[in-house]
Amino acid sequence: MNRIYIKALLCFGFVFCLSTSKGKAQNFTLVKDVEAVQMEINKVASSIETIKSRFVQEKHLSFMTEAIVSEGLFRFKKENQLRWEYTQPFEYLILFNGDKIIIKDKNKTNQFDANSNAVFRQINDLMLGAIKGDLGKNKDFEMSLKESAKQYLLTLNPQNEALKAYVSGVEIRFEKTDLAVSSIKMIESTGDFTDIRFENREFNTIIDESTFSPN
């Protein structure tokens, strides 16, 4: 598998912050009844069929003093369809459609089978699980669940050595008010990370199938 395209996924689509503002630091403690909380979170996640949103992405790199800022459009459709369309300052497209991963840069399009390689499969599951809020089901990660007064914090650490080469950890926050995902942070093995703020979110609206085609 081409290492360049794995890095592209890390750079352009590996961290999601579904709230429109950055949260303040909170004190978290371990949840006592993990199974009960997970059941409630999964129930909410299963009710979301589609998501539409604009996003602003900040990519934080250790060798740069300022974040790289990009903007674009995001679309999700159950079960396994994602569209990340970057519009500023450049055009770039990443699609997840079932078992297919498509990356389009200007006039060049590359397509991969998520099942053809273990790391691609795990990346596919990771991206979709993050959006759907059900990453706690992923056996490729060691999980811990904590809570504060306002949020639940699900932390996942990869157990697969191949995936560890790219991802060191995942943090997903759920608001206690609605149990929906409010932010997700994926940290690369290098320590670099990305924040994406979603704006004007719409849930369970109609999204045409052509949205998930590169044409």
Image (cartoon, helix red, strand yellow):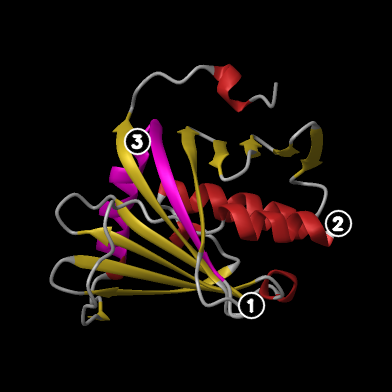
**Dot 1 and dot 3 residues touching (CB under 8 Å):** no
Query: For the residue marked with disc 3, what is the amino acid?
Result: Ile
The answer to which of 2 and 198 lies nearer the viewer is 198
Query: For the residue marked with disc 1, what is the amino acid?
Result: Ser
Secondary structure under tag 3 reads loop
Secondary structure under tag 1 reads loop
Mark 3 or 2, nearer chain start:
2
Q: Which residue is mark 2?
A: 2
7 displayed left or right of 37: right
Q: Which residue is mark 3?
A: 48
Query: Residue 43 in magenta?
Result: yes
> At 30% from the left edge and 37% from the top edge, which residue is drawn?
200
In space, the residues marked 3 and 2 are separated at their CA atoms by 33 Å
Secondary structure under tag 2 reads loop
* Image quarter of residue 8: bottom right
**Dot 2 and dot 1 residues touching (CB under 8 Å):** no
Q: Which residue is mark 1?
A: 189
Q: Position of residue 118 (x, y in %)?
A: 76, 58
| Disc 2: CA contacts within 10 A as few (<14), some (14-19) or many (>=20) | few
Identify the magenta region. 35-60
> At 32% from the left edge and 42% from the top edge, which residue is drawn?
199
Mark 2 or 1, nearer chain start:
2
Q: Position of residue 83 (x, y in %)?
A: 56, 36
Position of the N terminus, as image quadrant, is: bottom right
